[in-house]
Image (cartoon, rainbow, N blue to C red):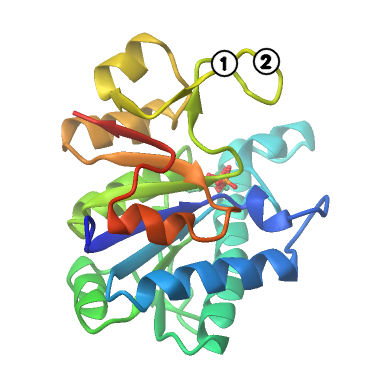
Amino acid sequence: MKYNRILLKLSGEALMGEKNYGIDSNRLEQYAQEIKKVKDLGVEIAIVIGGGNIFRGVQAEKTGIDRVQGDYMGMLATLINAMALQSSLEQHGMYTRLMSGIKVESVCEPFIRRRAIRHLEKGRIVIFGAGIGNPYFTTDSTASLRAIEIEADVVLKGTRVDGVYTADPEKDKTATKYSLLSFQEAYEKNLNIMDMTAFTLCQENNLPIVVFDMNRPGNLQKIVAGEDIGTLITS
Ligand code: UDP
C-alpha cells in the first residue's frame, strides 16, 4: 500500500446527496461501502466529517446568533454526521470509535491522541467529531491537525470534483486538472484547496493532501494502492 494510515476528510455538504438539507441515506451507504474496501486492505483509517449540510458558524450571524455560538452549533452538527457515519460503518461490520473535540460524555470519548492511535493500531476506524473543539476553525483544519497528531501518511480530501482545477470546472469549461502540485505552487496560484490554516499546517509538516472525487466508486481504494487519482499536493 502507498498509504498505511490515512485521514479521510468528508464534507458535510456531500452527505446531503441530492437533498437540500440533512443526511442522504444512499450517500451514507455508499461511503460505508467505499471505506470498507479500504479497511479490508488493512489500512488504518481516521475520518473527519464536516457539518455544512446542517449548520455552519458563518450562517449564524445572518440569523442574529453570535459567531462563537454559531460555531459551537456547527461543531454539534459535525457530531450528528459523525454519529450517522459511525452507525453506517458498524452496520457494515467495521469497528469504530467516535472521539469528540468537545465533551459529550454519554455519546463518545473525548479526543486523546494516544488513545486515538491505539484504536487505529487495533484496527478500529476513528471518527473525529466536533472539530478541534474551538470556534473560528473548520473541519479542514481539524483534518490537518488530527492527521499530524496521529502521524497519518496523507490527508485524503473527498469532494464532488475529481481534483484541483485551474478554474472552477462547474463554471468554466476550459478549466484543466492538475495531477500534481507543490504547496508553493498551490499557494502562488491561489488555488482554493483548503482554508489557509489547514493548508499551512499540512505544508509546514510535510503532510501530503490528495483531493479526489469521493462519489466515484473505487477511487479511495485506488489512491491508497498508489494509483494517480485526483490531485496530489506535496512538498
Ligand atoms: N467548526 C468550528 N470549529 C472546528 C470545526 C468546525 O467552529 O474546529 C464549526 C464551524 O462553524 C463550521 C462548522 O463547524 O462552519 C461545520 O464545519 P465545516 O464548515 O468545516 O463543514 P464542511 O464545510 O466540511 O461541511
* Residue assigned mark 1: 167
Identify the residue at image location x=60%, y=47%: 69
Identify residue type, mark 1: Ala
Give the total of numbered labels: 2
Q: Picture quarter containing residue 26?
A: bottom right
Taking 86 as reference, is 113 left or right?
Answer: left
Instruction: Give the structural element (helix, strand or loop) at label 1.
Output: loop
Identify the residue at image location x=39%, y=56%: 222
| Viewer-side residue, 222 vs 55 | 222
Q: What is the C-alpha distance between the residues marked 2 and 1? A: 6 Å
| Viewer-side residue, 231 vs 71 | 231
Relative height, residue 100 to residue 206 (above, below) = below
Q: Residues within 10 Å of mark 1 (few under 14, many from 20)?
A: some
On the image, the x and y values in percent for residue 146 come to: 29, 54
Identify residue type, mark 2: Asp
Determine contact: label 2, label 1, CB under 8 Å.
yes
Identify the residue at image location x=51%, y=67%: 34
Asked if residue 101 can be seen in this view, the reply is no
Relative height, residue 32 to residue 60 (above, below) = below
Q: Residues within 10 Å of mark 2 (few under 14, many from 20)?
A: few
> Which of pointers 2 and 1 lies earlier in the amino acid sequence?
1
Question: Where, quadrant-wise, is the N terminus in this rendering?
Answer: bottom left
* Residue assigned mark 2: 172
On the image, the x and y values in percent for residue 173 come to: 68, 17
Residue at the front extreme, as displayed:
227
Q: Picture quarter containing residue 78?
A: bottom right
| Viewer-side residue, 218 vs 11 | 218
Residue at the top extreme, as displayed:
188
| Viewer-side residue, 224 vs 28 | 224
Asked if residue 49 can be seen in this view, the reply is yes
Taking 202 as reference, is 35 left or right?
Answer: right
Q: Picture quarter containing residue 60?
A: top right
